[in-house]
Image (tube, helix red, strand yellow):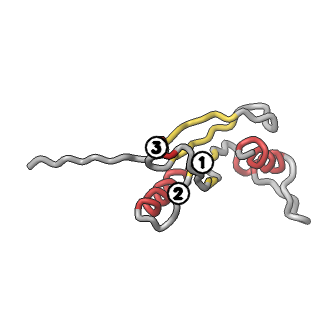
Amino acid sequence: MLLVYSSINAQVLYESVPSSKFNEPRNVKIQLPRNYEANEDKYYPVILVLDGDYLFEPVAGSADYYSYWEDMPQAIIVGVMQPDRMEDTVYDDANFLPTGQGADFFEFLGMELLP
């Protein structure tokens, strides 16, 4: 019996994003939707995954599965690697706003990674 299997899988890219907030690059993993090259002019929603070291694959796999069955739109998945997660999520106990490196990480996300 001969079984032939052909699949167009989502493409995963590994990038290093320069950061003026941290004075060093931050690593990200990016999954592009299936057939992205054929639809480069199409706009895709972006799903940002914090703790990308651990959560990128489950989120990217779920998004790929649900978009394949048209239960959600195709999306670009961006996983942010956080070597020092606790420092990246520091916030003020009184007003719950990010402080210190937490504020830098917040600004990195909004102004450098996804401008």
Question: Which secondary structure, mark 1?
Answer: strand
Residue position for label 2: 59
Among numbered discs 1 and 2, the one appearing first in the sequence: 2
Q: For mark 2, does the 10 Å Cα neighbourhood hold few (<14), some (14 to 19), or many (20 or more) residues?
A: some
Q: Position of residue 113 (x, y in %)?
A: 71, 43
Residue position for label 3: 38
Residue position for label 1: 79
The amino acid pointed to by label 2 is Val
Mark-to-mark CA distance, 1 and 3: 23 Å
Position of 88 with respect to 83 (left or right) is right
The amino acid pointed to by label 1 is Gly
Question: Which secondary structure, mark 3?
Answer: helix
Displayed quadrant of residue 83: top right
Q: Position of residue 45 (x, y in %)?
A: 61, 56
Position of 114 with respect to 41 (left or right) is right
Q: Residue at x 42, y 59 (%)?
A: 68
Q: Are marks 1 and 2 in contact (CB under 8 Å)?
A: yes
Tag in front: 1 or 3: 3
